[in-house]
Image: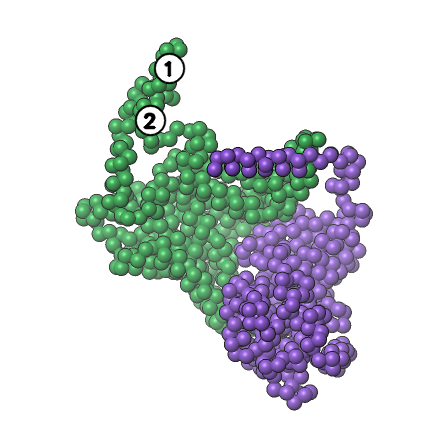
Chain colours: A purple, B green
């Protein structure tokens, strides 16, 4: 036994030593390698605070962070970012970025509304942006801040298309959706999804049911959090037991739990949210499509405007028209979605952009 | 130190190892108690060295996680100075930022901003100290209370509900909220105390389960209209009015609030309770040997209940510091992980009031500094959690720290050992 350990230790040491044997780069290479990228350096610092999900949540924190990194690469700005581990971290995190002399501070997630708003009021010479929530006062009346820009998405538009496609593709006549926590940026997905299914029923005299959400009463199924994959498994399984064959979880990583029970069930598909789950998750073959919020480009545009000195507090609202929203390709499901549905979806999309169809949700940005 | 002649004396005071073991198993069939005893009796030096050791290991991790260090490691043998200087830069910058965020920021332009970090440290330390004091009382009474998290949440619920629901004159309102917070925490902990006293249910299990119940209770309450802002579905309570909030101690630029004074007052109260009062004597007696305490006429079961009520009231006050002071709003995450961090604080502080205050400030400093470290150098804040955890790990294993620093062990009989070196020295001299 001792001998084995000795041999293993020696082997490890040799491996380390060999790995460390590379030749040193020339001094000039080194400065180029460690210095700024080829883009000219701009005297601008954009900063970002995540919510408790962290920047690796495969969801909106990650999308926002990608936007920030793109700005660093393409605009040559400086950046700083802090992750929050709990709700109580937001205020100190934002404050630390103010102390770092950031020009623009972006908060990701509705949970940061109060802290960002307080920081914006206390620091009038710093610009702020907030993803997924508008600003409001204590009585929930909307407030406009000189130096605060809400980045919002009228997600119901894209979810409407997903709902229509799901209803057309379902073989059991039952589709399902559920949310993480009942907040506007979640229910807006569910409203759009339910309306899309209703539109399909109306057009085709169908009777496809939506499990997990009743738009009229605003009541439905919620996991109560954005992190427990076990909750996603339980909720997903209960939908499958009730006969649903397409499920749209609007709950960040919780949805991955649903994807894993869908995989076990075999004939159940999942609709991703926020990013194209075919690309970002390991469940590609189950992903019928995804309702995409282009948070990254929105963040990039906001930073880019601020760098050019054109920061405005007007809300950015992502829509199908400005491509802030989109429906991901069907990927493996191309053969399963009826061809006439694909053309119908294009028509619906055009109608929404033209304003002939308005997808309404209580949660839509006003 | 081994050249002193009266070496064998301590051995006479320490009972032989076999005997100690028998006494302990007779006390209660509880291995946790022995570990707890070990943690509480190791010396201050070990605590200090545990912190140093944790910071050194944390530094190694900072260096290993640094991109520049990783790049230079690939050609270590052709130019080792690169790796060393990169590692030094990474670690020194990270710890300098930690210091700047926790104590004093030399980069700040005005004095107010420069000393602000220390006030931040004290703000974060407030709930840790309060909950840590409560847990310390439990530890000294032999109760391993893991339930501070739930007790903080209940304190927060009571304080918050009284705060945003009723409209009362300023001082009365605050006092009522603070009282409510203590009551909420005490009731929650009291459940575990009563179950332990009446049925013998183990407090570790019960308090952990009560933590989960508290987390879901606050999530449920925040889904009710009575706990939500009018016109909103978000799980966030209305803000606490000024009449019920802890006043800010240093004005609006600083978050430090009167809850810190409550924490200091609570530390004095705890000292008086444990060291000077009859009740505290009973707590300690039950903690050191429940059987002897029972023989001496102390009601062990009643003491368990009182210990939990006191511990819960202090943890509840930690909840008030969050809801009435720092956050001024009740959310599901208002307790963060303070209840669990407070366990570490109480252990590091040896369950003594002064130690708990100092340990609370240290952890507050790590937390507050970690934020700035992350913002300024990009070092992941998880490093702070690793350092905190390493401190606990080393405190829980005093022999490990002693062997790293070659310290003599205070417990093991070392009669035969000194004889040889002493004799050898005499010969050589």
Report the residue at 67% width, 60% height from top. A63
The residue closer to the viewer here, B283 or B84, is B84
Q: How many marks?
A: 2
Q: Residue furthest bottom?
A: A205
Report the residue at 75% width, 36% height from top. A25
Asked if residue A8 lies left or right of residue B421, the reply is: right
Q: Can residue B25 be seen at all in this image of the molecule?
A: yes
Q: Are marks 1 and 2 on the same chain?
A: yes
The residue closer to the viewer here, B57 or B364, is B57
- B357 to A213, vertically: above or below: above
Q: Which mark is residue A277?
A: none
Residue B60 location (% of width, % of height):
57, 38
Please give the residue where the numbered disc 1 appears in the rendered image: B424
**Mark 1 and mark 2: Cα distance apart in space:** 16 Å
Q: Quadrant of residue B71?
A: top right
Q: Can residue A181 be seen at all in this image of the molecule?
A: no
Please give the residue where the numbered disc 2 appears in the rendered image: B414
Report the residue at 61% width, 39% height from top. B63
Instruction: Please report, as a chain letter, where disc 2 is located.
Output: B
- A4 to A215, vertically: above or below: above
Residue B7 location (% of width, % of height):
31, 22
Q: Quadrant of residue A168?
A: bottom right
Residue A298 location (% of width, % of height):
72, 62
Q: Secondary structure at mark 1?
A: helix
Residue B79 location (% of width, % of height):
70, 31
């Amino acid at each position: 036994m001792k001998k084995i350990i000795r041999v293993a230790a020696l082997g490890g040491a040799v491996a380390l030593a060999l790995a460390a044997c590379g030749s040193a780069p020339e001094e000039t290479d080194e400065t180029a390698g460690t210095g700024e990228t080829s883009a000219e350096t701009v005297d601008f610092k954009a900063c970002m605070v995540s919510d408790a999900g962290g920047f690796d949540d495969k969801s909106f924190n990650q999308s926002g962070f990608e936007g920030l990194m793109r700005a660093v690469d393409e605009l040559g700005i400086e950046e700083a970012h802090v992750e929050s581990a709990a709700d109580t971290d937001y205020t100190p995190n934002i404050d630390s970025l103010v102390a770092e002399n950031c020009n623009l501070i972006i908060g990701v997630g509705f949970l940061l509304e109060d802290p960002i708003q307080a920081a914006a009021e206390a620091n009038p010479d710093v610009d702020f942006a907030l993803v997924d929530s508008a600003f409001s006062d204590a009585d929930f009346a909307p407030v406009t801040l000189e130096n605060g820009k809400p980045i919002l998405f009228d997600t119901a538009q894209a979810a409407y298309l997903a709902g229509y496609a799901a209803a057309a593709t379902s073989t059991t006549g039952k589709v399902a959706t559920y949310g993480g926590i009942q907040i506007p940026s979640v229910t807006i997905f569910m409203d759009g999804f339910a309306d899309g299914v209703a539109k399909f029923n109306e057009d085709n005299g169908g009777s496809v049911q939506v499990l997990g959400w009743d738009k009229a009463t605003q009541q439905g199924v919620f996991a109560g959090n954005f992190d427990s994959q076990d909750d996603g498994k339980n909720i997903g399984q209960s939908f499958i037991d009730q006969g649903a064959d397409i499920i749209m979880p609007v709950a960040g990583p919780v949805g991955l739990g649903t994807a894993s029970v869908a995989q076990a069930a075999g004939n159940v598909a999942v609709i991703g949210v926020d990013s194209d789950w075919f690309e970002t998750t390991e469940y590609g073959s189950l992903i019928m499509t995804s309702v995409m919020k282009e948070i990254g480009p929105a963040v990039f545009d906001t930073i880019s405007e601020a760098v050019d000195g054109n920061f405005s507090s007007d809300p950015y609202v992502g829509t199908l028209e400005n491509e802030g929203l989109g429906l991901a390709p069907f990927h493996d499901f191309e053969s399963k979605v009826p061809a006439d549905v694909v053309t119908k979806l294009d028509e619906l999309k055009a109608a929404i952009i033209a304003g002939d169809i308005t997808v309404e949700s209580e949660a839509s940005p006003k | 130190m081994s050249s002193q002649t009266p070496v064998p004396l301590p051995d006479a005071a320490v009972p032989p190892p076999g005997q100690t073991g028998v006494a302990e198993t007779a006390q209660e069939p509880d291995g946790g108690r022995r570990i707890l005893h070990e943690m509480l009796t190791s010396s201050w030096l070990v605590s200090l060295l545990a912190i140093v050791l944790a910071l050194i290991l944390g530094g190694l991790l900072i260096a290993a996680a640094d991109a520049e260090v990783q790049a230079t490691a690939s050609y270590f043998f052709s130019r080792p100075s690169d790796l060393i200087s990169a590692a030094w830069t990474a670690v020194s910058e990270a710890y300098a930022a930690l210091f700047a965020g926790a104590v004093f920021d030399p980069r700040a332009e005005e004095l107010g901003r420069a000393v602000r970090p220390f006030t931040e440290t004290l703000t974060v330390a407030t709930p840790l100290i309060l909950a840590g004091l409560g847990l310390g009382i439990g530890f000294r009474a032999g109760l391993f209370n893991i339930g501070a998290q739930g007790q903080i949440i209940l304190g927060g619920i009571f304080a918050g509900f009284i705060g945003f629901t009723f409209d009362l004159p300023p001082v009365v309102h605050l006092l009522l909220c603070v009282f409510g917070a203590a009551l909420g925490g005490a009731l929650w902990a009291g459940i575990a105390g009563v179950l332990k006293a009446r049925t013998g249910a183990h407090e570790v299990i019960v308090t952990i389960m009560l933590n989960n119940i508290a987390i879901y209770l606050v999530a449920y309450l925040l889904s009710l209209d009575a706990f939500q802002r009018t016109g909103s579905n978000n799980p966030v309570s209305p803000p606490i009015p000024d009449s019920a909030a802890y006043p800010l101690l240093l004005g609006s630029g600083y978050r430090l609030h009167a809850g810190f004074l409550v924490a200091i007052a609570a530390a004095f109260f705890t000292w008086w309770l444990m060291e000077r009062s009859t009740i505290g004597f009973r707590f300690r007696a039950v903690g050191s040997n429940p059987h002897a305490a029972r023989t001496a006429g102390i009601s062990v079961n009643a003491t368990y209940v009182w210990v939990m009520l006191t511990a819960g009231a202090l943890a509840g006050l930690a909840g008030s510091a969050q809801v009435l002071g720092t956050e001024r709003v009740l959310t599901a995450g208002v307790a963060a992980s303070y209840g669990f961090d407070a366990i570490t604080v109480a252990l590091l502080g040896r369950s003594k009031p002064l130690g708990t205050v100092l340990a609370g400030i240290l952890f507050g400093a790590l937390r507050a500094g970690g934020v700035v470290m992350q913002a300024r150098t990009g070092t992941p804040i998880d490093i702070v959690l690793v350092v905190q955890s390493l401190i606990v790990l080393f405190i829980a294993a005093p022999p490990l720290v002693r062997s790293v620093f070659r310290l003599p062990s205070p417990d093991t009989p070392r009669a035969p050992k000194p004889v040889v070196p002493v004799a050898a020295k005499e010969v050589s001299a």
